[in-house]
Image (tube, rainbow, N blue to C red):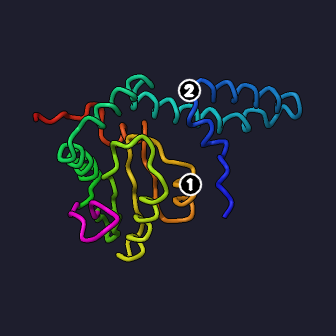
Amino acid sequence: MQPRKDTLFAILSRQPWWITVLVAFVVFWVAHAIFPPVAPFVAVPFVGLAVYIAVKQWRSGSPSDVGERLEALRAMPWESFSGAVTRAYEKQGYTISPSEGRGYDFKLAKNGRVTLLQCRRWKVNQVGEGPVRELASAVERHDASRGICLAAGEFSQPARRVAAGEPVTLISGSDLVQLIGASPRRSRG
């Protein structure tokens, strides 16, 4: 299986919002030089993308703030971390139940669809392909619509390749911080 190529959207979404605004200006002027009537229409999608990225980055905070929040998440004991995660999904309207088998930690149900959630490796720096394969197998065994794997660290390239070919979503970094919220609670003890 070929590794998935990054799209322009994916590349720009990892950059500061103002980079996308610069791309919009460059695209506008290049299009204006070639065929002026279409220049605004070519640049508008980039402006929209810049607004989307700016809002997303504003909600998740500065990169240093995200790093601090990820460290706070890693410092949490399992009970606090799993509680923060389940509260986040409950706010999105999911019904949460504990695992009934291997490969996942919680079963999320919403609108008749089941999603399996794996978050037990939240503290590791890099999640490999093994846990992602395990989650994908659980999704198939339990006839779930998809699986979600959460980590405060990163996912290895092999793990990303496995997820690309399976109904598995990987959530880490600023996406995890945004999911759980602005200030994860530390537990006492």
Q: Tell me which residue sits at (23%, 61%) in the image.
A: 95
Q: CA distance from mark 2 to mark 1?
A: 27 Å
| Residue 150 as seen in the image, left or right of residue 41 | left
Q: Residue furthest left?
A: 189
Percent coordinates x, y for residue 157 in the rendering: 57, 50
The stretch of residues the image draws in magenta is: 96-107
Secondary structure category for the residue under label 2: loop
Give the residue type that dot 1 points to: Pro
Left or right: where does residue 63 sit relative to residue 88? right
Q: Give the image location of residue 53, x and y in percent.
A: 52, 34
- Number of numbered discs overlaid on the protein picture: 2
Q: Which mark is residue 72?
A: none
Residue 158 image label: 1
- Residues packed near mark 1 inside 10 Å, few (<14), some (14 to 19) or many (20 plus): some
Q: Nearer the viewer, residue 112 or 149?
A: 149
Q: Could you tell me if the residues under marks 2 and 1 are in contact, i.e. CB atoms within 8 Å?
A: no
Instruction: Rate crowding at label 2 as few (under 14), some (14 to 19) or many (20 or more) other CA atoms within 10 Å.
Output: some
Q: Amino acid at mark 2?
A: Pro
* The C terminus, quarter of image: top left
* SS at circle 1: helix
Depth check: give the residue in front, 95 or 69: 69
Q: Is residue 185 magenta?
A: no
Check if residue 99 falls in the magenta segment.
yes
| Residue at image location 68% in from the left, 60% down from the top | 2
- The residue sitting at 83% across, 29% down in the picture is 30
Q: Quadrant of residue 99?
A: bottom left
Which of the two labelled residues, at mark 2 and mark 1, occupies the earlier sequence position? 2
Q: Residue at x 39, y 28 (%)?
A: 67
Which dot marks residue 16? Answer: 2
- In which quadrant of the rendered image does the N terminus lie? bottom right
The picture places residue 163, in percent across and down from the top left corner, at 52, 59
